[in-house]
Amino acid sequence: MNPILLISLLVVVLLGAFFIPKQIKERRENQRREEVEDALKHLLDREQQGRHASPESLAGALGFATTKVLKILARMEMQGLIEHRGVELHLTAEGERWAIHVVRAHRLLERYLADEARLPLEKIHAEAHRREHGMTPAQVDAMDAALGYPAHDPHGDPIPNKDGIIAEVEGIPLTSWKKDQLARIVHLEDEPEIAFAQILAEGLRLGQTVRILESSPERYLLSDGEAEYRLAPAVAANVHVAALPESMLALADAIPLDELAHAEKAEIVALDEACQGFTRRRFLDLGLTPGAVIFPELKNSFRDPRGYRVRGTLIALRREQANQIWVKPITAGAH
Amino acid sequence: MTTPNEILNKAAELRGTLSTGFRDEIVKSLYSESEAITNRAVHAKGEKTYDLDQRIDRIVTSPIFGLPLMLVILAVVIWITVIGANVPSNMLASGLFWIEEQAATLFTNLGAPWWLTGFIWHGVYRGLAWVIAVMLPPMAIFFPLFTFLEDLGYLPRVAFNMDFLFKKAGAHGKQSLTMAMGFGCNAAGIVATRIIDSPRERLIAILTNNFVPCNGRFPTLIMLGTVFVAASFSPVYASIAAAGSVVAVVVLGVFFTLIVSWALSKTVLKGEASAFTLELPPYRSPNFLQILYTSLIDRTFFVLWRAILTAAPAGAIIWIMANINIAGTSIAQHTANFLDPLGFLMGLDGVILLAYLIAIPANEIVVPTMLMVYMGTGMMIELESMEALRTLLVEQNGWTMLTAVNLMLFALLHNPCATAIITIYKETNSRKWATVGALMPLGIGVVVTIATASIARLVGWV
């Protein structure tokens, strides 16, 4: 056999022997870490709901066979993350600390993906889930600071702070809310995904003010004053609402900037809750702050975008953007 | 004594008590404070009106005049660039090539071996000289004109008018401006995408900028339009047909930009439309010194420098390929023969593909490289008369109408030049996106030319 061929074959085999087991080992370790972290999240979730986790509930949540779950649990117990009390599973202090770290990473990532990367809302959960593993506490702290210490994720879930303290979940399920009373959507449960997709498909979003028009075992009928929304009661239970804060009352007779007639002057009341991160910063930078006077000055032959005069400058906004700015028309007599 | 850590801890503690809207409050108070200062310091006589601005805006954004006005301005800018660059380009070329000749003679007289003289002067130097001669004048004309329109305040109105198209494609209206810049130079167009502030839309604009034919490709398109397309019409319509074919290619480029932007925003670059905020500044008379500085220093020389860096090695490679023979034939010829089957499939030939391969630093030197291989000369050349060109291509090398049309398509749809690829890499800081930016247009070009060639052959046009 050709000696050169022989040597190169040898080199390839040696290189393989060095690197491939290492890679396989790394991959297996990563996978194990993900399994443990997902299990931790489930246990934390159960504890917060005041229910007890069991190997069966874990198997259901992770989609694994019970035998595999038992192996994962054995590993976790060895690492000192969980303890058995009879048939009940409990997180140890160390386990809870780690679980909260993962939840914090997940919710901060969701905030980032929604506000800065501008991923559609129905996509952020899966993407954050993919990226949450393997982040160090220092990286999560840095992300928290870069995002400006947000309090809630884009679904309204509270984000744990640096010390692992999680605020109470605001609001009560829509199904427990009184009919005809104004409510603000404070939380949209993102699991199960099908229910969340339905909520988004209906067009409901965080921060929206709604009223229950009709509730029956078959459906819930909501209104935000313009459009009507229909939800199945099981889905409606995934929408959490709270009473309107003082500041929202000012929005009562405000209209979206987009609906302003040409050259009609108005005063900006507020930027919509749904508009966060990059978009909100941009608006504020341009001087679109509450109290500023604005009016549509430049029409577009294609309807969109429209030019608005604010603080002496002309700024063009698309309809979707203008819809996120609430204004109150100034009547000629008032000013 | 308060330590920095105590302050930080206090801040962290207070942060929890802040209401969610505190950022809005900060900006609001900044604005009201500066408003108060302005009101105290600046006194206006009467209320400021924007009558003139409004009147101009009504014309440039009107449904009837808006778009035609934009197209006319763009056409005029490109026309001035192409026509105006001719004379200085020729002067630069004859000056720089005169130096080449003198230096080569000097080297020969000093007894330097032929390959050293050839490599340095007919290879590296000639590559450099050619790129400078053909790139500098058009850019030195195009960029000041473009910067003039920018300074005038007209360009944001173009973005305002065109946004409806880009919105449908999931892109940003300002992409129309980076495209317009791309007519001058794709690398400059890619740098110009910095005006798009959201990363997703900016990446779309970067990756699709190459679908706009740049200055370097216009001469090729015009040459093909004149020699081939115009020749098949009666003399009366010849120049209209030539111009029409170039315009058709440009329109096709815009079409591909929008389609690919749309496809990207629906697949790999999926996301919601970001904040579209476009400031429409008041019109003002431009500052000419400022224009010259921005356009020449920031744009022309910036791009030219990158082109020079890649032109020198390419000049060397082109010379080596044309002058080193294996079994009596140059490496260039061997490679062209090897590429011939693929070339045939694409309705082109091996020499054309070879030229696109080795003339990657600048689109301007593709045709000279092609002619070099066709004529078997040792260096890049140009033919003076269109008639001689036609004879060489059609009678000696079997070009048909299909070759010309597909070359026009391929000139539009192929990988960006090395300068543009480097610029994509620098702007995105990612090898992945630079690779995508290079291979995606090439892939589309191969598919499109193979499709047109197959259809033409099936139907029996060729």
Image (cartoon, grey):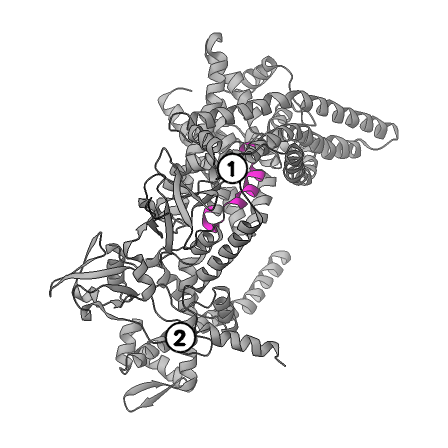
Callout 2, which amino acid? Glu
Q: Which of B65 and A200 is in front in this view?
A: B65
Which element is circle 1 on?
loop
The span shown in magenta is: B183-201
Residue A182, given in percent of the width and then of the height, sits at 23, 63
Residue at 42% in and 34% down: B161
Question: Is the magenta region chiefly helix, strand or loop?
Answer: helix
Q: Which residue is denoted by mark 1 in the rendering?
A: B282
Residue at 61% in and 79% down: B2
Q: Does the magenta stretch include residue B197?
A: yes
Q: Which residue is denoted by mark 2 in the rendering?
A: A37
A228 over A308 or under it: above or below: below
Q: Mark 2 lies on which chain?
A: A
Residue B265, given in percent of the width and then of the height, sits at 40, 46
Determine the residue located farthest toward the right in the rendered image. Answer: B110
Callout 1, which amino acid? Pro
Residue at 11% in and 64% down: A216
Location of residue A109 by image quarter: bottom left
